[in-house]
Image (cartoon, helix red, strand yellow):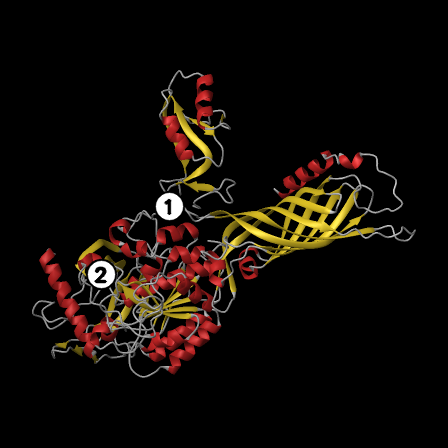
């Protein structure tokens, strides 16, 4: 497929998706709403198409250790602003310098100076000086001497966990923005004992061939699409997301059953930001890359509609999904869905139930700033429930993302990305199913002149840059999982910590664009000492 | 570390010779503990249990506002019952970094933290020997005293995962008042018990938990027990 034709397919499919989301799909399916039939395991390897250079969709309407413990020597920070070990200077004397001369040189910089036996694997000497002396000054003085080749303080080095994932440096500005590299130094387990439920469009979590029933339908341009009938659809686990033993209690509240596969891509992308496999040399990194994942499907996409889902996501599925997650061991819930309109007591009740069972909930703050900025109902509920947090989005410049809703319900902000002004690289990148490949979607013309469509496949993946508060939310959920790993199990305390250490943006103090500010992972996990 | 300090103190005390106290003492009709031979130098070992004023800060990070300090020093007494104490003590404690929520609840984050406090204190005071006739039943002699002084307090704090500027090594001057009594248990040994109030501004309250909860005093109220060698 040429680049131009790929772009055409992408544009066409995006347009079709938008049409469907905005107006809904009139489905004429038979056996609509039946759970897919598991046919057999899918044994072909998934296709990883690498990093997408295509612009992602517009934000959807929300549907080292670094040092020895307790080092006996307190570091000093010299005039160059770099910490060094107090009381030591590393010196390379010129060859042939006698021991007496060396000692004399040492005595010139510190009356208490001594030289110990040269350490192994060193071609230099370690000179001990007065612990209160300025080692940088001492090194400078020594360097001036003719018998010294060079001298330097014993500057501290620190372990830095920088993931080796292939596209990490290139694409994941979002993780660096919240100081994840140093946060991982603090919390290397990365949430291995914590289960996070992702209530979304499902997750590409299993290798299976499922049978769906493709219904006839009429699209918004009144094109009639013939029914596909029973079709066997291949699914593969996202290769940079799923590892053995990682999935816990999957559940589908759209079709029912235990195969909450992702027919949309949104849920897999969100789950990637939360917990993409990291430091594996492949793809991208995730915030809490060792968490266990509970895929809970509470919202559907176009293909779910075509395959006859009765409910594409409602207060009912969200509330039941929250209760299911709380009852099945989740400690964190990521809720990158939402709606506007009247209140949702059924969801509020479910959120309070989950929090009472020790579950922290992160909820997307809304993407409708430019569409009248209506109240985001689920986020507004979260703002009133201690232990649930609503999340706004910032762009790569730390400004409010143009779409990010503002209001009293906004509690914290996280990277949500934006293509406007930043292009493709402004998105939050993660691996998800590549719907532009292998499937002829429903946009007129996408399948040539045929007013029809082909069965899709969900075993092809790509790293897409998406934008939205949906993308911001899993940063917070992941940070909450890391905090829980560190022993903060009270959801209200998790919320308090995340807010306490957030970096204030916008007007001083809490505001309606950023809440308490941009989350700061490292400071949150490290906490406070007595005096600093 | 504490064992080493304790051993050093014991060694100092063992080696110490109360020179002036060994001079012949003039017979006195009274067993007054008041020195009659001029200036006396009396080494001592001290055990301090201090309740720090920054109680929330200490509770959150070091588990308790009560901390133990060990040390030793030297007391100089005069014929007229003035005294000067010089002491060095040290607290060394492991804890965890933490935060305190808006309701005052403390949460520890399992990030190791090590804090030390080394007060070097000088106090001046007056002793009030109680002159009583000896009886067979009353063998224990009591000498109340009060005093006040200044100290130099060095505080260090280091944590895992620190980078430049995140550990603390700070020294500040503080003030103290004290009052207690010395109990003579033998000719050469006295035990003192006193209460000491210290105020140490300038170290806490600028950052960390102490700033979060608005505590800026590294002092507190301490109960001290000293074993003093000398008459």
Q: Distance between the residues labelled 1 and 2?
A: 33 Å
Q: In which quarter of the image is residue A505?
A: bottom left
Residue B185 falls left or right of residue A73: right
Of all chains, the one bearing label 1 is A
- Above or below, A427 relative to A147: below
Give the labeled residue for mark 2: A434
Q: Residue furthest left?
A: A449
Q: In which quarter of the image is residue A367?
A: bottom left
Q: Which of marks 1 and 2 is nearer the N terminus?
A: 1
Q: Which residue is drawn at 37% across and 45% down?
A: A160
What x and y, as percent, mark residue A523? 41, 56
Which mark is in front, 1 or 2?
1
Does the image show residue B138?
yes
Q: Which of A240 and B50 is in front in this view?
A: B50
- Above or below, A101 relative to A172: above
Q: Which residue lies furthest to the front in this view?
A: B80
What x and y, as percent, mark residue B221? 63, 57
Report crowding for label 2: few under 14, some 14 to 19, many 20 or more residues within 10 A (C-alpha). many
Circle 1 SS class: loop
Q: Nearer the viewer, residue A360 or A203?
A: A360
Report crowding for label 1: few under 14, some 14 to 19, many 20 or more residues within 10 A (C-alpha). some
Q: Residue at x 42, y 77 (%)?
A: A350
Q: Nearer the viewer, residue B196 or A200?
A: B196
Of all chains, the one bearing label 2 is A
Circle 2 SS class: loop
Residue A55 falls left or right of residue B164: left
What x and y, as percent, mark residue B151? 58, 48
Give the labeled residue for mark 1: A160
Does the image show residue B117?
no
């Amino acid at each position: 497929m040429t680049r131009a034709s790929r772009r055409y397919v992408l544009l066409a499919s995006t347009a079709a998706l938008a049409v469907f989301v905005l107006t809904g799909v009139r489905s004429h399916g038979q056996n609509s709403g039946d759970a897919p039939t598991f046919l057999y395991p899918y044994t072909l390897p998934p296709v990883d198409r690498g990093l997408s250079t295509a612009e992602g969709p517009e934000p959807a309407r929300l549907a080292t250790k670094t040092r020895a413990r307790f080092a006996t020597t307190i570091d000093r920070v010299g005039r160059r602003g770099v910490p060094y070990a107090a009381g030591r200077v590393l010196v390379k004397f010129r060859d042939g310098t006698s021991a007496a001369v060396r000692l004399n040189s040492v005595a010139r910089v510190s009356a208490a100076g001594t030289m110990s036996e040269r350490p192994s694997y060193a071609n230099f000497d370690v000179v001990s000086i007065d612990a209160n002396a300025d080692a940088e000054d001492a090194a400078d003085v020594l360097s001036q001497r003719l018998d010294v080749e060079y001298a330097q303080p014993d500057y501290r080095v620190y372990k830095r966990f920088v993931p080796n994932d292939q596209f990490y440096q290139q694409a994941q500005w979002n993780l660096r923005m919240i100081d994840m590299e140093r946060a991982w130094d603090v919390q290397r387990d990365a949430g291995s004992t914590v289960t996070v439920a992702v209530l979304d469009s499902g997750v590409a979590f299993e290798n299976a061939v499922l049978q769906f029933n493709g219904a006839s339908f009429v699209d918004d341009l009144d094109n009639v699409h013939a029914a596909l009938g029973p079709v066997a659809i291949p699914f593969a686990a996202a290769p940079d997301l799923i590892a053995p033993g990682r999935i816990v209690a999957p559940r589908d509240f759209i079709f029912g059953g235990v195969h909450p596969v992702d027919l949309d891509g949104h849920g897999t992308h969100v789950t990637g930001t939360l917990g993409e496999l990291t430091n594996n040399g492949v793809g991208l990194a995730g915030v809490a890359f060792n968490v266990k994942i509970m895929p809970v499907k509470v919202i559907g996409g176009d293909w779910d509609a075509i395959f006859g889902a009765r409910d594409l996501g409602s207060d009912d599925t969200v509330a039941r999904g929250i209760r299911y997650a709380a009852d099945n061991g989740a400690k964190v819930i990521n809720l990158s869905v939402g709606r506007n309109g009247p209140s949702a007591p059924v969801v509020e009740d479910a959120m309070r139930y989950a929090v009472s069972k020790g579950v922290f909930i992160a909820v997307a703050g809304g993407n409708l700033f430019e569409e009248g900025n209506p109240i985001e109902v689920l986020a507004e509920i979260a703002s009133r429930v201690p232990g649930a947090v609503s999340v706004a989005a910032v762009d790569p410049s730390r400004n409010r993302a143009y779409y990010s809703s503002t209001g009293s319900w906004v509690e914290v902000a996280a990277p949500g990305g934006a293509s406007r002004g930043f292009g493709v690289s402004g998105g939050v990148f993660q691996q998800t199913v590549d719907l532009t490949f292998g499937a002829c979607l429903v946009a007129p013309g996408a399948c040539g002149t045929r007013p029809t469509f082909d069965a899709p496949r969900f075993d092809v993946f790509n790293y897409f840059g998406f934008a939205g508060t949906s993308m911001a939310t899993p940063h917070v959920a992941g940070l909450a999982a890391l905090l829980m790993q560190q022993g903060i199990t009270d959801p209200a305390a998790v919320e308090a910590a995340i807010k306490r250490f957030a970096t204030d943006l916008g007007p001083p103090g809490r505001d309606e664009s950023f809440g308490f500010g941009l989350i700061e992972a490292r400071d949150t996990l490290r906490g406070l000492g007595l005096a600093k | 570390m504490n064992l080493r300090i304790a051993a050093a103190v014991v060694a100092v005390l063992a080696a110490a010779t109360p020179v002036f106290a060994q001079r012949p003492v003039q017979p006195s009709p009274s067993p007054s503990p008041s020195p009659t031979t001029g200036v006396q130098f009396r080494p001592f070992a001290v055990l301090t249990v201090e309740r720090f004023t920054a109680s929330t800060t200490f509770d959150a990070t070091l588990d308790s506002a009560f901390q133990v300090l060990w040390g030793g020093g030297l007391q100089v007494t005069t014929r007229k019952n003035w005294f000067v104490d010089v002491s060095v003590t040290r607290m060394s404690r492991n804890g965890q970094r933490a935060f305190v929520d808006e309701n005052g609840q403390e949460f520890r984050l399992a990030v190791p933290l090590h804090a030390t406090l080394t007060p070097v204190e000088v106090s001046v005071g007056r002793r009030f020997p109680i002159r009583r006739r000896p009886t067979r039943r009353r063998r224990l002699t009591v000498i109340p005293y009060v005093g006040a002084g200044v100290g130099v307090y060095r505080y260090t704090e280091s944590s895992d995962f620190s980078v430049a500027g995140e550990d603390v090594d700070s020294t500040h001057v503080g003030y103290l008042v004290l009052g207690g009594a010395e109990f003579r248990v033998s000719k050469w040994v006295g035990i003192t018990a006193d209460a000491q109030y210290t105020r140490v501004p300038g170290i806490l309250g600028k950052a960390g938990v102490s700033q979060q909860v608005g505590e800026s005093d590294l002092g507190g109220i301490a109960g001290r027990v000293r074993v003093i060698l000398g008459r």
